[in-house]
Image (cartoon, rainbow, N blue to C red):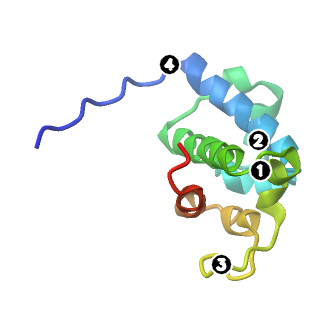
Amino acid sequence: MQALPASPPLDDSARHAALRAVLRLFDHWQCSEKEKMALLGVGRSTLHKYQSRPDSARIGNDLLERLSYLLNIHQALRTLFGNKENVYGFVRLPNHNPFFNGASPMDVMSNGRVASLYEVHRQLDSLRGGQW
């Protein structure tokens, strides 16, 4: 089996664009400061720097992975739902499927673990059932 070619690395402008997009997404999700810090895996001062000067952020691989999962979660929600209330509100709704067990996706994602972002994305990806 032949290996797939590696994706080209993202340049700084693409990384900064991803950060700006996620910060806007946090506004739509009505994230608290604590949630933003957990989702990005950063402390308060770093979050404030990102919010005030996103284009000066040093975006390493851990943060890039988090940004990627968050943007993919948003894309999955856009695929699943046709209205903004559900696209942006779903992350706050209690979910009673076995994975969430009554917690909202935000409850799960805001524990600060990258694995939780991955799992929420995986759950949403399975719901879309081949819609993309």
For label 1, the SS is helix
Q: CB of mark 2 within 8 Å of CB of mark 1?
A: yes
State the CA–CA distance, disc 3 to disc 4: 39 Å
Q: Residues within 10 Å of mark 4 (few under 14, many from 20)?
A: few
Instruction: Name the residue at 25% across, 29% down.
Output: 5
Q: Judge left or right: residue 113 versus residue 61.
A: right
Which residue is label 3 attached to? 97
Q: Is residue 55 left or right of residue 126?
A: right
Q: Position of residue 111 (x, y in %)?
A: 67, 66
Distance, label 2 to label 1, CA atoms, is 8 Å
Instruction: Check the image and report above or below for 22 versus 80.
Output: above
Badge 1 amino acid: Lys
The label nearer to you, 1 versus 3, is: 3
Pick whichever of labels 4 and 2 is earlier in the sequence.
4
Q: List the residue tagged with mark 2.
A: 47
**x and y, in percent, of residue 46 in the image:** 73, 40
